[in-house]
């Protein structure tokens, strides 16, 4: 059992780090939900690869949740250096949308400009908790999909089962 826990931990660390980096880097972060689901699938694959016994869907969900938590932490720290770039990109997108759609609510420019220079600890922690919850759900989904795709099939035990021949209806009396 301890061997399975350490295998889950290492699979979640590896796949969570990969998914967290990909979801925190600009341009790649647009697919962050798919990165996390893929990270859960990768964790399930690594877990199946190292396990001599068949694993269940619950094992995939557990390793996926841990993968999502690791990915949220990695994403939080990776996205800090790119914060000003992301805010600037968001401002350009909003400006582009206002050309097509009309007016934005009053005060949005001040909100974006004040947010681009300040990173507060409560804001960081709230974002971390939010992404940890969302990434855990997506990671569990990826882990379930990964176990379903890569897992060894569980065969029912036939020990102690008596094989009774079928009645074909041809009784000779």
Image: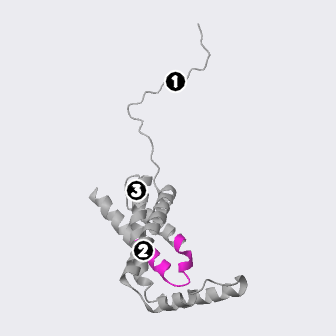
Q: Which residue is mark 3?
A: 59
Magenta highlight range = 14-33
Q: Earlier in the sequence, mark 2 or mark 3?
A: 3
Of 32 and 123, the residue lying toward us = 123
Q: Earlier in the sequence, mark 1 or mark 2?
A: 2
- Residue closest to the far top: 173
Locate residue 60: give its quadrant. Answer: bottom left
Query: Magenta region, mostly helix, strand or loop?
Result: helix
Image quadrant containing the N terminus: bottom left
Where residue 89 appears, x then y in whole percent?
A: 57, 88
Instruction: Give the residue at x 38% y 31%.
Output: 160
Q: Is 7 on the left-hand or right-hand side of 154?
A: left
Q: Is 2 on the left-hand or right-hand side of 38?
A: left
Label 3 packing within 10 angstroms: few (<14), some (14-19), many (20+): some
Label ID, residue 165:
1
Instruction: Give the residue at x 44% y 40%.
Output: 156
Q: Secondary structure at mark 3?
A: helix
Where residue 12 appears, x then y in whole percent?
A: 39, 68
Of 20 and 107, the residue lying toward us = 107
Q: How many marks?
A: 3
Label ID, residue 72:
2
Locate residue 108: give its quadrant. Answer: bottom right
């Amino acid at each position: 059992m301890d061997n399975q826990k350490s295998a889950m931990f290492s699979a979640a660390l590896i796949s969570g780090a990969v998914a967290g980096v990909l979801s925190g880097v600009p341009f790649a972060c647009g697919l962050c939900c798919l990165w996390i689901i893929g990270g859960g699938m990768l964790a399930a694959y690594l877990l199946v690869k190292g396990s001599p016994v068949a694993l269940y869907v619950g094992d995939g969900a557990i390793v996926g949740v841990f993968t999502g938590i690791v990915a949220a932490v990695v994403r939080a720290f990776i996205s800090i250096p790119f914060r000003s770039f992301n805010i600037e990109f968001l401002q350009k997108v909003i400006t582009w949308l206002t050309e097509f759609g009309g007016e934005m609510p009053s005060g949005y420019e001040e909100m974006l400009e004040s947010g681009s220079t300040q990173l507060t600890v409560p804001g960081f922690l709230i974002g971390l908790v939010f992404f940890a919850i969302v990434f855990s759900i997506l990671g569990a989904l990826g882990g379930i999909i990964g176990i379903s795709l890569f897992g060894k099939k569980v065969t029912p035990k036939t020990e102690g089962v008596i094989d009774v021949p079928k009645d074909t209806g041809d009784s000779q009396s």
